[in-house]
Image (spheres, rainbow, N blue to C red):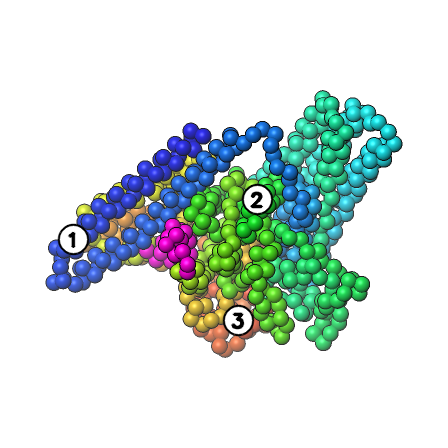
Amino acid sequence: MKTLKGELAFTVAAIALTVAMAAMAGLEFVRQGARLGFERPGQLAQLVAFALVVGLMLYGGLVYQLARAGYYRRLSRRSQAEAEAPSGGAAKPCEKPLLVLVPSYREELKVLRQTLLSAALMDYPRRRVVALLDDPPTGTPAEMGALEAARRLVRGLDTQFAVCAAGFMRAHWDFLARARLGPLAPAAEAQGLARLYCQAADWIEAQAPAWVGQGAGGHADRFFETEVLRRLVAEHRGRAERLQRSALAPAEIEAEYQRLSRLFDVRIESFERKRYANLSHAPNKAMNLNAYMGLLGGGYREESGPEGLVLAACGRGAATFQVAAEDYLLTLDADSVVLPDYARKLMAVMERDERVAVAQTPYSAFPGAPGRLERIAGATTDLQYMVHQGSSLFQAAYWVGANALLRRKALAEIRQEAVERGHTVPVFIQDRTVIEDTGSTVDLVARGWRVHNHPERLAYSATPPDFGSLVVQRRRWANGGLIILPSLFRYLSGRDSGVRAGEGFIRLHYLLSPTLANFGLLLLIVVPFEAPAASLWLSLAAAPYALVSARDLKLTGYRWRDLVGVYALNLLLVPVNIAGVLDSVRQLVSGRKAPFARTPKIEGRTATPLLFLALEALGLSGLLACLTLDLAAHRWTHAAMSGVNFALLAFAFSRFIGWRNALTDLQLAWAETARPAPAMTPPLHAAPALALGFGMAPISLDWPLETLHGVEAWQARSFRLADAEAARAVAEG
């Protein structure tokens, strides 16, 4: 408790220092502007632009510190509430049915297996898990084999859980029969329960995969084994030991048998929307989820039509396929893992407050990443976790998307309909942007619903292990904020707009941060702003943000010096983020949705697209040119900034991309351009997209939707490192 209060006080002091130093810098700008007057309009305009840019950059730092204060304030309140709660007064756990939806597109089997197992092993009584397999139903033999393997995986897990659950259910029925026949022997029942819990522990222990610790995702495998499987094994064996020493009442004995009977009583199913012509085939996660959500509570049968197989609604008697209508849905990305108590804790939140539409724990990175880039990229994820948590204090939380518990009633309120290939399809989670969860947040809060961030790390997700896959992820993350902005303005300008000032301060930055931070940094690098007196105050104003960020890295298991790596990585990602922002601008101008690019997840390395290799080279040469010009003009402050940024960008390129990898990717790109054009040639009107892409795969929204999945793969140029030599041979030959 003292530590939490200390961190809160530290953050408040940092905020006060930031505001004070920013105010001093502002006064210095005013003084310098007054000296310039209107006789030197060019210098005055440059000064105003400089003040505006650094003001917006400080805005981001202030939001981070406010969110940090909110995070520790929430933790303090929670700690105090737990300390004051009466012992033994726990509320009855929620037992309402829960549906877990796992959207998956060509996921590696071991990754999908871990996600499904973590969902199925949650300590919650009534749950159903559905893998939404989004692979096309037709393709090459290898693709069809992978799809069939995913189907077999789901069927196999369902069978394993059913067989295991049957044994514990029989034990429960046998107990009920004994209880009806006469007096129970509590000691014998306790011994029997202890044996059953040991059997449960043995079964879970057997699920530990043989490939734990092997391959690129070894640290994620180890985390799954330790924090999910081993934790459950320890809990069940510990419970068995306690039962052997306990004298239980009949009601307690029955409760234990009932709990055992529900531990593995979970249905694991799969569903493939693309098998049916009348469901959405839009290539994005949102519409994959929407397609299944639209079926909830209905009965259906398969029928053949001119377009192929359709899923026709019908009465219960004629239905061959029925979908239950759970009130609560848990969406879980196929590369994520939830801890066993995830559902129990978040369902309690939902039951306490009926206006919570989304309850989540913003995901954390799997700890122990072996690669430099994955570790530093994971650090940015873990820092962002704190921002999400702290924003809840200001009622400014956003739905993050990798994992979330949803109230179906709330989704029904924002339901819309769209027409796709002549069929009307439901849209619960909007897909206007590629950050569908953020856009849906604004839709929900505008109708009086809330997003709740549970202040505990209960969910973990994969971080891209190489720069090629990180490009795809971060470009997608940077795309969409500008598109959602008008909806947020409409919400904030509604009733009680004054009350929403704090909320708006946080929410606006979340949407604008890719634009403000990256264009702002680019301007500071390129334009030689000179305001020596103000620069001193600005440096002092930025120092608290750097200090609290470094402290947060240390508190989350990283090192103080990793702050340098985080800044270097952010510098490397500037062209990627700007490309994402420009994707938003292009969608605003054209009215066409940006295609959803999935983050590649393969055992080997994903090649960096030629566009971004060229932009990184341009950035290095540009910084070197700025340094040379600054030194020649005696602009010492800007020269120091150019020199530091050049050194850090070169460091980031060397550590996070690698000169040898860059050369391999260039050779691969050259080999691809030398090959004959693929059969799926884009139409002539896609030429502007090709020009804008500059080394990226041209994407025309007039192509068939299935083609876009192929474009993603081509754009990412994924290949295994073992094939690197073959790639070089192709390039040379």
Between label 2 and label 1, give the one nearer the viewer. Answer: 2
Residue 32's disc number: 1
Q: Amino acid at mark 1?
A: Gln
On screen, residue 590 versus residue 223, left or right, reads left
**Which residue does the numbered mark 2 point to in the structure image?**
352
Q: Amino acid at mark 3?
A: Leu
x then y, percent, for residue 146: 68, 56
Between label 2 and label 3, give the one nearer the viewer. Answer: 2
**Which residue does the numbered mark 3 point to in the structure image?**
701
Q: CA distance from mark 2 to mark 3?
A: 44 Å
Look at 27% across and 49% down and name the residue there: 641
Residue sticking out furthest to the bottom = 684
Overall secondary structure of the magenta section: helix
Residues packed near mark 1 inside 10 Å, few (<14), some (14 to 19) or many (20 plus): some
x then y, percent, for residue 289: 61, 59
x then y, percent, for residue 731: 51, 61
Residue 359's disc number: none
Mark 2 or mark 3, which has the lower sequence index? Answer: 2
Which quarter of the figure has residue 427? bottom right
x then y, percent, for residue 375: 48, 43
> Is residue 240 among the parts visible in the rendering?
yes
Residues packed near mark 3 inside 10 Å, few (<14), some (14 to 19) or many (20 plus): some
Q: CA distance from mark 2 to mark 1?
A: 56 Å
Mark 1 or mark 3, which has the lower sequence index? Answer: 1
Circle 1: element type: helix
Q: Amino acid at mark 2?
A: Arg
Query: Which image quarter holds the N terminus?
Result: top left
Look at 34% across and 58% down and name the residue there: 519
Q: Which residues are magenta?
A: 494-520
Give 709 or 455, whichever is nearer the viewer.
455
